[in-house]
Image (cartoon, rainbow, N blue to C red):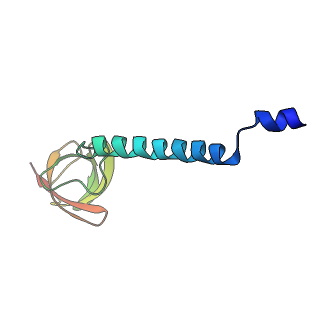
């Protein structure tokens, strides 16, 4: 039993190694985060911006569905629009886009 006890490192050494590893991991995460700070994400969050282009998928009576960057949105606009038309986004109101003929 005495040989096993002498082979084990003291508790302070184990604590120091764990603290050092945690500190190194934190420093690495911080350096990575700073390097990514100015990078633009390919993922967009929120409604499409005004002036973006959309494609009418379904339309009837001044409202319907449009595709914007591969996403389907509800939209309102002139009743004269038809499926297949390309439109411009005027504004976003919640989850509904207001569009007009391009």
Residue 13's x, y, as percent?
63, 43
State the residue at coordinates (55%, 48%): 19
- The correct choice, above or below, for 94 with respect to 9 in the image is below
In depth, the one of 60 and 45 nearer the eye is 45
State the residue at coordinates (41%, 40%): 28
- Tell me if I can see residue 79 in this picture: yes
Q: Quadrant of residue 47?
A: bottom left
In depth, the one of 72 and 48 nearer the eye is 48
Residue 59's x, y, as percent?
26, 53
Q: How many marks?
A: 0
In depth, the one of 55 and 78 nearer the eye is 55
State the residue at coordinates (62%, 48%): 15
- Tell me if I can see residue 57 in this picture: no
Quadrant in the picture for the N terminus: top right
- The correct choice, above or below, for 70 with respect to 49 in the image is above
State the residue at coordinates (18%, 61%): 77
Residue 91's x, y, as percent?
17, 62
């Amino acid at each position: 039993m005495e040989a096993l006890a002498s082979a084990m490192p003291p508790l302070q050494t184990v604590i120091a190694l764990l603290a050092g590893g945690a500190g190194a991991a934190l420093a690495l995460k911080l350096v990575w985060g700073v390097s990514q700070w100015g990078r633009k994400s390919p993922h967009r969050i929120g409604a499409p911006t005004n002036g973006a282009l959309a494609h009418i998928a379904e339309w009837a009576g001044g409202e319907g569905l449009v595709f914007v960057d591969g996403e389907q949105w509800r939209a309102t606009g002139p009743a004269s629009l038809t499926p297949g038309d390309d439109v411009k986004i005027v504004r976003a109101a919640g989850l509904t886009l207001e569009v007009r003929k391009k």
